[in-house]
Structure formats: structure tokens, C-alpha cells
Image (spheres, rainbow, N blue to C red):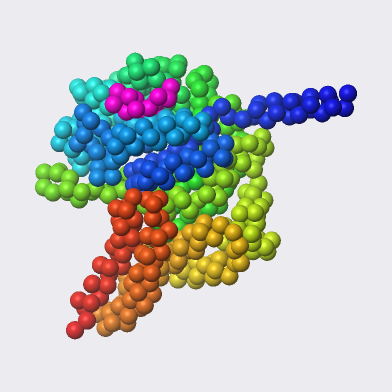
Amino acid sequence: MKRIAAVMLLVFSLIQAKAHEFPVRGFHIDFRTQVMTLDAMKDFATELSGFGINTIVMEWEATFPFDRHAVICNPLSFSKEDVTEFITHCAGLGIDVIPLQQCFGHVEYILRHDRYSHLKETWQQEISQICPLKSGSAELFADIFAEVAALHPSEYFHIGGDETWLLGKCPHCRKYAEKHGKSRLFVDYVVKMCEAVTSLGKRPVLWADIITKYPEAIDLLPKNAILVDWNYGWNIRHFGDIDKVIASGLEIWGAPAIRSHPDNYYSIDWTKHFNNQKDFIPYARQAGYDGMIMTSWSTSGGYGFFWDQHNVITEMDPVRQVFPMKAFRMLIAMYGEALKKEASINPHDFVLHYAKDRFGISDSDAEKLWEVFNTPQTIIMHGKAEQGKGDAVSVIRDKAVSDRDILYAMKVKTNKAEFNMFLLMWDIRVQFLEYKTIEAEINSPDFSRAKASEMLARLNDKVLSVNVKLNKRFAETFKGYLKPQEIEYLNALRLRQSGRTAQMLKNMIP
């Protein structure tokens, strides 16, 4: 009887565990920038599988091997064989690969080309959004969908649809919105996109921010559509009336983030991402969401442009780079653990356990690591934090140096390569803050040409001279993980501002 009772208890516990498990446990990868190698992608999928992930949402963007629309492809694009090899590898792990093909906003990489530029929402130097009313828009993406879907066996197809902030800007769209409302302007076009996906035998998925902001026409969305409520640490009504979205009866997935605003190349808001998992995942479970997709944005999703005359784009760069995803295994592992828990995960306890188990460090060092991760890392503007209202950059720099020294003093026994990425991250942060400190002084009323030699010497000593070693470490750390061109680009990016400043100072010296 005791044995039967034990078996029954085990079965009951397994049933309970499955009861609060999301059927879709996913991870989103965007290749706007920081494009990984095929081997790294496969290794990452294997690691994700170990964390319990069964879905990858792939936003290939211009790295997809388009055929009929080959002009879209960038120099980092994969071959069809690469895409198939990755999807086959994932299938062997039990991971479904869902393609994400933007078709409304975030289509700069398409509209930059002459072949498609006539479809943009506005005539000004703004090419982020397609016009939903122009003839050819729906047909273009129906054709692109077919190309992408042909290489992805998944039953799902993500059509994007987020951040369409130009809704109603062109004259035709403005009149349509005045008569029918922005919700109808958005939904009528999205319905066409969903129909194109359904005709391919797929189920449409889209981000939920715009329909949450303009929910009036939500009942017109196809009943097979899935909405993804992305929330990176704010109030659940950040975008609007989420209650109406839930009441629509449509299937909903949630999406937190391990890299998002205000993160950049030089600072990560670890506290925000810890709390995002702690708060949002249990909320989504309680609200009855059927899936969870962790996002990890290498960029803001916007672009900066170099223009020739007549609005001709000569080059475009992603706005805001973030430190490569390889350094965030701890947050990914935390996500895997949070998916298994019915209650909120405790970030403090998880980080301490991870630090001791993964790196073999002492209890006291694990606690220090937690404290370092929770140091505020805000954007620097006008020589201060918090948009020019917080601590002076010199104060922030001194704290970063102190935190870096704490990291270097830790006795790491295992997985040193992973821990060394934290050291590199903080070294790059200190280099950046050293430059911002000098920049703030150059921009102060006290600066004059007479101080140019002194400032140049400091710039060489604190910023430029350390860059050779940082470049080498960065290249060695991400060799085989990022494509070589991406490593070169990210290394060069760090010296754009400081290099120009150095040249300016040199020109001031007789």
C-alpha cells in the first residue's frame, strides 16, 4: 500500500507540475544585428532545450536567404541550407522554430530599397512603416510570407505588427482613420496578413501592443490569431486595455525580456530583468496565457541613416547595440527555472545559487555578485545619469570601477569563460564612463583650447590605450559565436565618439 501511495503521489505531483507549465515555452532571437554563426545557433538551441525551451521565434530580418526578393538580403545572410540545417537540428531537440517576418512596422531593411520604397507610409525621411492602404503592400508580404514559410515547417507564423507609430500619417490613412478609427486601420491590414498566413496552412501570431492601445476592432481579428503581450517590467496596462484583449477570447502568449531598453553596449539594467521574470511570468500564468516567449533584443529595433540628396539612403545602422547575448546565460537559466515554478521566482536566491553552483565561488562572493548586478546602470546624458538629473558621470564611473574590482577579486573555480564575460562587460563599461567623464569636462564652461593637451593625454591614457587589449579580448570571447564582420563592427563602434574627440583635441594643439 505504501508503494502504491508513493506512486500515486508521484503521479499527482507530475500532473500538478504540468498544470502550471506553459505549453509554448519559447525564446526569441533577432538578427537585426549581432548575427550568430550557424554552429553557435545550434549550440544555443541545444542549451535552450536543456532549460526546457520547446520553441524558438526566429526574426531573421535581412539575413534570411530571400530568392524572389533577394535584394533584401544583407552581407550576413544565411543560405537556404543553413536555415534548413538549423531547423532540422532544433527539431531533433523537440524545438519548434517559428519564423517572425515583420510586415507593417520595423521594415526599414525592406523599404530602404528602390524596389519597395514607394510603399512606405510617409514621403519624409522615415521608412520604418509600410502604408497599409497602398496597392501592392499586402501582395508584397503575401509573397514574402510564402518564401519564408517554405523553409519553416512550424504550424505558426509570426507577422510582427508592433510599434506601428506612424498609423494614419499619410493622407489616405489619415482619412481612413478619421472615418473608421485607428483600430480599424490597423486591424483591416492585419486581417489581410493573417489570411495570407492561413492560406499557407499556418496560424498567425502577432505582437499585442497596438491592438491593446486601439482595441475597438479586436473582434474583427481572426479567431485563430495569437497575440503576444510583451511586457518588460512595467504596469500590465502600459500599452492600454489589456482586459479587453483577454476578454476577446484570442489565445495569448506573454513575452518578458533579458535585454531591452534602457540596456546598451555599456550598461545592463539587471535589476529590471530580474524583476521582470519575477513579476510577469506568474501574472501571465494566472491570467491564463498559453505561452511564454523570452525576448533578447540586441538593438532597439530602429535604425539611424546616412542620406544622400532626394532622400536616398546610402547606409543604415541599428540604433543602440547591447552586449552580446552569450554573456546572459544566467538570465536565460533563470527563465528556464521560472517557467517551472508556479510561484514567483526569487531572483536573489537564484543568483546566489547560480553563482555558487556555476562558478564555485563562496557565499560571500555570491552575495557581492548580487550586489554588483543590482548597481543602477542608467543612460548617461549631459554628463549625468537619468537624463541629466542624477549623479555626475564621474560618480557613476567610480562606482563602476569599484564593482569591477570586486568582480576581479572573486575566486572563480569553474566556468571561468562565462564569468570572464562579466569582467569584459565591466571593463568596457569603465572605458565608456572614462570617456563620458572626459566628454563632460570638454563640454563644461571651464574648457578652453589651453586644456586640449591635458584632455588628450587623459583620453589616450584612460580610453584609447586600453582599446587594443579590449578589442583582442572581445574578438577572442566571441570568436565562433558572432560572425566575424559583427565582431569587427562592434569593436570599431566603441571608438566612434572617442576617436572623433581625440582628433578634435589634436587639431587644437599648436
Instruction: Confirm whether the magenta stretch covers residue 267.
Output: no
Query: Nearest the camera: 132 or 74?
Result: 74
* Residue shown at 40% from the left, 60% from the top: 476
Where is residue 381? Give x, y as percent.
39, 60
* Quadrant (top left/top right/bottom left/bottom right) for the N terminus: top right
Q: Number of labelled discs?
A: 0
Q: Is residue 286 above or below residue 459?
A: above
Q: Farthest residue toward the right?
A: 1
Where is residue 256? Give x, y as percent.
51, 39
Q: Is 123 placed left or right of 13 in the picture?
A: left
Magenta region: 146-164
Where is residue 456? Give x, y as percent.
30, 78
Q: Is residue 507 above or below residue 41?
A: below
Q: Is residue 166 above or below residue 203?
A: below
* Quadrant (top left/top right/bottom left/bottom right) for the C terminus: bottom left
* Residue shown at 38% from the left, 31% from the top: 99
Query: Nearest the camera: 173 or 471?
Result: 471
Q: Is 130 placed left or right of 42 in the picture?
A: left
Q: Farthest residue toward the left?
A: 309
Q: Quadrant of residue 71?
A: top left
Query: Nearest the camera: 273 or 388?
Result: 273
Where is residue 297? Give x, y as percent.
42, 45
* Residue shown at 40% from the left, 36% from the top: 86
Tell me if residue 321 can be seen: yes
| Dominant secondary structure, magenta | loop
* Residue shown at 33% from the left, 76% from the top: 460
Query: Nearest the camera: 425 or 233?
Result: 425
Q: Quadrant of residue 403?
A: bottom right
Instruction: Confirm whether the magenta stretch covers residue 163.
Output: yes
Tell me if residue 169 can be seen: no
